[in-house]
Image (tube, rainbow, N blue to C red):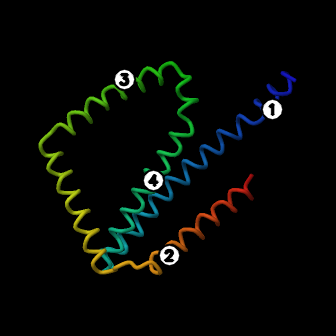
Amino acid sequence: MKRSCTWRNRLLSPLIYLAALILLIEDWLWDQGMRLVALMAITSGHPFSGVFVIIVAKIGGAAVVARLYALTRPTLLTLAWFARWHGWFMRHKQTWIGRLKASDAYRRASALAALLRRAARDAFARLHPRGDATARRNRRPARRLRRFIALWRARRH
């Protein structure tokens, strides 16, 4: 049993490196293509579309990297050098975040953001008053979406 696992690992190891290389190249090409498309949109008179593409690409890239990090963190922490640097970074990150949250500018920005969220929520409530029938009707798409997600997950497993 042990011998077959070693054989399988030796056989699959180059394929894993190849897949990682393909993903890196694809990611690089995707980033370059998105930059070109966004710049083409801006230069051809669609500045909002171009900026929107750039923002979506940045958010999407950050989401992919965050997901990959979350998936690989347990394995990465088995490496001594990574665990040491990860611990150092996380300690300092908490210190930096603490200093940021203690700053007067952060408190003012947080208060302003809360005020804007409250004003937007109140304005939306004034524009769209909800009755019982409206509230029920607005919950239907969410219910359908949850049902679809449950069915999709059931089919995957």
Quarter of the image for the N terminus: give it: top right
Look at mark 1 in the image and give the residue it sits on: 8
Q: How much space separates mark 1 and mark 2, taking CA atoms?
A: 55 Å
> Which of 94 and 47 lies nearest the eye of the viewer?
94
Query: What SS does tag 4 mark?
Result: helix
Q: Who's the residue at 54% across and 29% down the image?
A: 76
Look at mark 4 in the image and give the residue it sits on: 61
Res 56 label? none
Q: How much space separates mark 2 and mark 4, taking CA atoms?
A: 36 Å
Foreground mark, 3 or 2, reads: 2
Q: Who's the residue at 65% across and 45% down the image?
A: 19
Residue 95 picture location, percent across and down:
26, 29
Q: Along the polypeptide, which appears first: circle 1 or circle 2? A: 1
Residue 50 picture location, percent across and down:
35, 71
**Which residue extends farthest front?**
132
Residue kind at label 3, given as amino acid type? Trp
